[in-house]
Amino acid sequence: MAQFGLIVIGDEILSGKRQDKHLPKVIELLGARGLQLSWARYLGDRRDHITAALSDAFASGDVVFSCGGIGATPDDHTRQCAAAALGRALVLHPQACDLIEQRMREVALEQGVTWEPGRPDNQQRLQMGCFPEGASIIPNPYNRIPGFSVGDVHFVPGFPVMAHPMIEGLLDGRYAWLHGSQRQAEHSVIVFGGLEAALTPLMETIEATHPGIKVFSLPSVDHPQWGRHIELGVKGSASAVALAYADLLAGLAACGVQLGPELVR
């Protein structure tokens, strides 16, 4: 089954200058389509770190969305690092070139100036269309400046207003056939007076007895409604969850703990 990963790149995220909006949005986009995010990585603007992370992404076989660093300023390294990770040259993609030039013409018209393709700043903008050899483009409905894909690793801008529609387009196009394939049910209960260490054998037994089920334990010490407690539950396919949850409740009864509300997601 395909796994989905996310890479978010930028010093501004790690320094706190910008709050990351990609992780919650990608989780939302996947969840709405019955899919799940398996992993996420945050990276600063260091070429060695980015290249290593992208090497891992290409080798993983996962569907990976990489957000940020595909511009043409000195702190944008993602295009170069993708090429290095693949051992390929950066080349100007002809379709990307056309789209960037089209956008530059539009901007010149909006500003009431003559478009001069040979001007240094316009030539610099074409760097945004230099991708690893063999890449395909990702349409950008916001301003035409495309992202790119190599295999199942997809590169989009750091701007959420651009990145999120581009990711959504990939999910509803290239990966539409996966919709619903990772949909999971969850059933949990609030446990009072129990300790995780004491409940661990029960959790291990549930997972061993019910293949495909994951047991989760979320302790809280200062919940505004329930105070100190553990939310203990199971997740997996709906049919498997029903059986595993029944065994979980039976095991908790044997432990003599007090149970609170049940939660179904």
Image: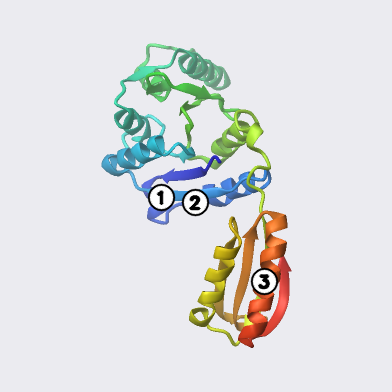
Which amino acid lies under the numbered mark 2 shown in the image of this protein?
Asp
Secondary structure beneath label 1 = strand
Front-most of residues 151 and 200: 200
Which residue is at a point 31% across and 38% down the rendered structure image? 51
Is 208 on the left or on the right of 91, as rendered?
Answer: right
What residue did someone put label 3 on?
247
Q: Earlier in the sequence, mark 2 or mark 1?
A: 2
Query: Of all residues shown, which one is farthest toward the left?
Result: 48
What residue did someone put label 2 on?
20
Front-most of residues 253 and 38: 253
Q: Position of residue 166 (x, y in %)?
A: 57, 33
Which amino acid lies under the numbered mark 3 shown in the image of this protein?
Asp
Which residue is at a point 61% across and 72% down the rendered structure image? 232
In the rendered image, which quarter is residue 123 located in?
A: top left
Q: Which mark is residue 42?
A: 1
173 is higher (above) or lower (below) than 260: above
Q: Can the viewer see residue 265 in this picture?
A: no
- The mark closer to the camera, 1 or 3, is 3
Question: How far apart are labels 2 and 1 at the CA level?
Answer: 10 Å
Q: Earlier in the sequence, mark 1 or mark 3?
A: 1
Question: How far apart are labels 1 and 3 at the CA level?
Answer: 38 Å
Which residue is at a point 64% across and 80% down the rendered structure image? 252
> Local crowd at mark 1 within 10 Å, few (<14), some, or many (≥20)?
some
Front-most of residues 43 and 15: 43
